[in-house]
């Protein structure tokens, strides 16, 4: 039985790196609920990991997208317009900060590193919203992935805390601006997951152990858990939910760090 019915909906998923990615957990759930999914991969190196996953989801659109390369994001939406002529939802699940800036103190972050982290992790969501807007002719939903470090200081999360805080605020402002067109915008805040992106955070294994021990439900979440929430949020069942930050972390956020 489908969790929700997404039959007939067309969605774009940006951020799959491998089978452990949050974006893949979401894409698979979208597909299992009946949606058609367009999938992007970062570059030629990552394509060999992403393409088989996209093909397993019968994705009719599988294209490269490095948001730092001018024109690539625009090309994705051109492909969607030509093939589908519409779009119902977008999942933005990308983030990046240079290693030295990510591992250092916020006060020591370089201007270049901060600008790059904000551009790839936050401004790219604004760009996607702008490109998606004319394709969401029947309304739609934009989702982005955040983390508890946007609200509270989390050890070793460093510069990504301010960046994710900016991303969450951006989602709220986009929700206010696009709401009259029936386009909803929400951020999802999962608990720590062992993904390739998370592996760049120092002492991440300790962070996961702490989260599992302190969360009220005493366990970590999975990419399938996040996918279930994402599927609900893009469905018609969530048509009156916008501007929200939805935690899915087994309750860890109510305990604090």
Image: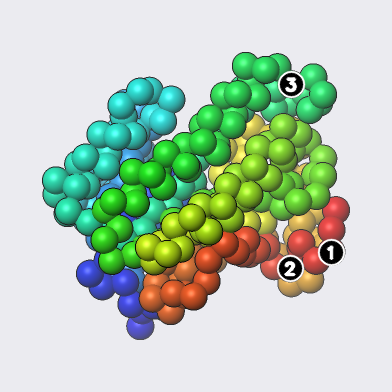
Residue shown at the point (31%, 29%) measured from the top left: 72
Q: Earlier in the sequence, mark 3 or mark 1?
A: 3
Give the camera-side residue of 250 and 48.
250
**Label annotation for residue 255:** 1
In what element is the residue under mark 3? loop
In what element is the residue under mark 1? loop
The colour scheme of the drawn protein is rainbow
Circles 3 and 1: CB atoms closer than 8 Å? no
Give the camera-side residue of 255 and 183.
183
Residue 126, given in percent of the width and then of the height, sits at: 47, 42
**Label annotation for residue 232:** none
Q: In this rendering, does residue 119 appear at all?
A: yes
Residue matched to label 3: 109
Cα gap from disc 3 to disc 1, whole angstroms:
29 Å
Residue shown at the point (82%, 24%) measured from the top left: 107
Mark 3 vs mark 1: give the one in front.
Answer: 3
């Amino acid at each position: 039985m489908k969790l929700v019915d997404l039959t007939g909906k067309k969605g774009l998923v940006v951020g799959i790196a491998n089978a452990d990615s949050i974006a893949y957990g979401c894409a698979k759930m979208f597909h299992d609920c009946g949606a058609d999914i367009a999938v992007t991969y970062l570059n030629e190196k990552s394509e060999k990991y992403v393409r088989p996953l996209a093909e397993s989801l019968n994705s009719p659109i599988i294209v490269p997208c490095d948001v730092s390369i001018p024109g690539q994001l625009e090309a994705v939406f051109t492909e969607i317009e030509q093939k589908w002529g519409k779009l119902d939802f977008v999942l933005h699940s990308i983030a990046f900060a240079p290693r030295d800036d990510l591992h250092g103190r916020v006060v020591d972050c370089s201007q270049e590193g901060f600008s790059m982290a904000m551009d790839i992790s936050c401004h790219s969501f604004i760009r996607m919203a702008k490109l998606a807007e004319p394709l969401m002719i029947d309304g739609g939903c934009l989702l982005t992935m955040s983390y508890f470090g946007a609200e509270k200081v989390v050890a070793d999360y460093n510069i990504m805390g301010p960046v994710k805080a900016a991303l969450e605020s951006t989602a709220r402002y986009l929700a206010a601006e696009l709401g009259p067109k029936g386009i909803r915008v929400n951020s999802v805040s999962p608990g720590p997951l062992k993904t390739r992106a998370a592996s760049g955070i120092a002492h991440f294994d300790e962070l996961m152990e702490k989260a599992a021990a302190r969360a009220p439900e005493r366990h970590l979440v999975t990419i399938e858990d996040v996918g279930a929430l994402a599927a609900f949020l893009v469905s018609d069942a969530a048509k009156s939910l916008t501007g929200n930050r939805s935690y899915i972390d087994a309750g860890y956020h109510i305990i604090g760090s």
